[in-house]
Amino acid sequence: MRAGPSQEEVRRHNLGTLLRYVHVHGATSRAELTTRLGLNRSTIGALTADLTAAGLVSERTQRDTGRAGRPSLVVRPESSTVYAYALNIEVDRLRAARVGLGGRILDRREAPRPRGMQVVDAVQPLAGFIHEMRDVPSGSRCVGVGLAIAGMVRRADGMVRLAPTIGWKDEPVGDALVEEIGDVGPVTVGNIADVSALVEHSRGAAAGRDNVIYLYGDVGVGAGIIAGGKPITGHGGYGGEVGHMVVNPQGRPCSCGSRGCWETEIGEYPLLRLAGRGDRSGREAVLGVVEAAMRGDWIAQQAVRHVGEWLGLGVGNLVNIFNPEAVIFGGTLRDLYLVAAAQIRSRLTEVALPACREDLRLRTPELGRDAALIGAAELAFERLLADPLL
């Protein structure tokens, strides 16, 4: 029979809990930490002293609150000196940032990614961005690198098993990145929709809601799913590939090899084709259709309406399966949602069971395009938050 946790294990757990709280919520008074974490004042004081000695937080006297008595100390994450590098490989862009503890973006870079670019050609500029952002304050600490990619990522080792919209299959992107950047800490790879869902759930549009679907769209469509406050990624980490659920068996061939997948009806290609702009590609082309529809262009409006109908149908199916409190539309789906909300809601209402949708909220990302970068940084911060004294 296993004994209960030791005093040291409890202490390290509490350190992680406190650090995670201020990482997500920002500057917090000792008094509030006592209430929120259910620990007594002396324990909170000892924990913050340990985290301060480790250089992870700092404490300052709270400004005059107008109340009698000694003001409570405020605990703040050391955002400027404890940081992670966050990288995104998107269909059309390469993005990088240095993100401080607390989710604060301290520096950023980005460049276009020509379609067809191979792994080695993608990791070289990302490594270059990291080298450019290494001008940091003395005594700073890098906890590692988080990389988010629009593709299926094997959780165990970060292998990109399939990224059809990028053109990669069974690519060890994390290993390739390590070879380029050298030793800046562990490199963790994740799916872009999954990491975006995590941060929108913890600090964005879905904060306070524990059942959330984050839809990320560009050429393809993926989902990050939170159920009961926990990410649902499946056995190997491949869960959430909702863009490849078949919605139209007589539909068009999909890049995955199937036919009639959801993304063949709501992705970039069908929208541009229906709008008579099939010779164009990329986010700017999608925005062009959206703006034309808003100006009254009939062909663009018909294209947007078509996509909105299929988007609402697919979301309705997901609502019946997961019964979320919120569905967030990210990537180019954000722009489509803003112009096709009426069609999406109408179709969703037809498809989704009343009990499953009665408390549903449809949202756009509060963190915008930065959700993916901040989410990638969370991959790197996780080891520190789990055990701050490692």
Image: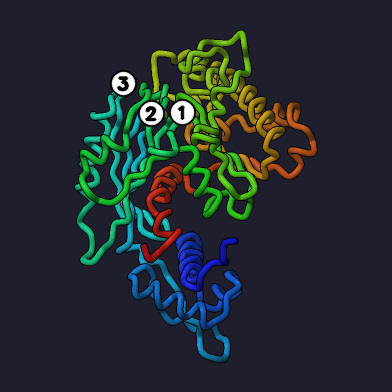
Asked whether the viewer can see residue 342, the reply is no
Residue matched to label 1: 218
Report the front residue among 349 and 141: 141
For marks 1 and 3, give the CA distance. 15 Å
- The three-letter code of the residue at mark 1 reads Asp
Quarter of the image for residue 94 reads: top left
Residue furthest to the front in view is 1
Q: Which residue appears at 51% of the width and 23% of the height?
A: 267
Asked if labels 3 and 1 touch by Cβ distance under 8 angstroms, the answer is no
Q: Secondary structure at mark 3?
A: loop
Q: Quadrant of the C terminus?
A: bottom left
Are there few (<14), some (14-19), or many (20+) residues within 10 Å of tag 1? many
Where's residue 10, x and y in %? Answer: 51, 69
Report the front residue among 60 and 192: 192
Q: From the viewer's perspective, tell me whether residue 92 is left or right of residue 16.
A: left
Residue matched to label 3: 116
